[in-house]
Amino acid sequence: FDSWKNASAEIGAVLSMGQRRASGQMWIAVALRYRLPKVAALVYQGRLSARLVSEISWRTQLVTDEAVAVVDAGIAARADKWGPL
């Protein structure tokens, strides 16, 4: 039993997308919620594109827990000026 896979299948069905795409969206949401709250605030305000948020979340996945707050603040200070990647 894989609860992540089941949840992503349910979300995918509701949003009319595949299970893998839904899983990716869930991964981004978890990264924003727990690792990148300042970037998440920009997303909430509508200042970042979905593509940019995807790139930020995937490119910061190997940042250590000790350093992620500094990285989050640095990205949040600059991200709305980057435009599409």
Image (tube, rainbow, N blue to C red):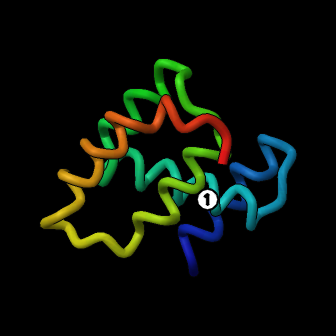
Q: Circle 1 sits in a helix, a strand or a loop, which is it?
A: helix
The residue sitting at 57% across, 81% down in the picture is 1
| Left or right of 7 on screen, residue 30 | left
Q: How many marks?
A: 1
Along the line of sight, the residue nearer the viewer: 82 or 36: 82
Along the line of sight, the residue nearer the viewer: 31 or 54: 54
The residue sitting at 41% across, 47% down in the picture is 32
Residue that extends furthest to the bottom in the rendered view of this protein: 1
Residue 43 rendering spot, x and y as whole percentages = 49, 30
Instruction: State whether residue 3 is above or below residue 33.
Output: below
Along the line of sight, the residue nearer the viewer: 5 or 20: 20
Q: For mark 1, what is the residue?
A: 7
| Left or right of 64 on screen, residue 23 | right
Along the line of sight, the residue nearer the viewer: 58 or 20: 58
Instruction: State whether residue 54 is above or below residue 1.
Output: above
Residue 11 rendering spot, x and y as whole percentages = 69, 49
Q: Quadrant of residue 22?
A: bottom right
Q: Quadrant of residue 40?
A: top left
| Left or right of 53 on screen, residue 70 | left
Circle 1: residue type: Ala
Residue that extends furthest to the top in the rendered view of this protein: 45
How dense is the environment of label 1, judged by Cα within 10 Å: few (below 14), some, or many (20 and up)?
some
The residue sitting at 71% across, 53% down in the picture is 10
The residue sitting at 59% across, 52% down in the picture is 54
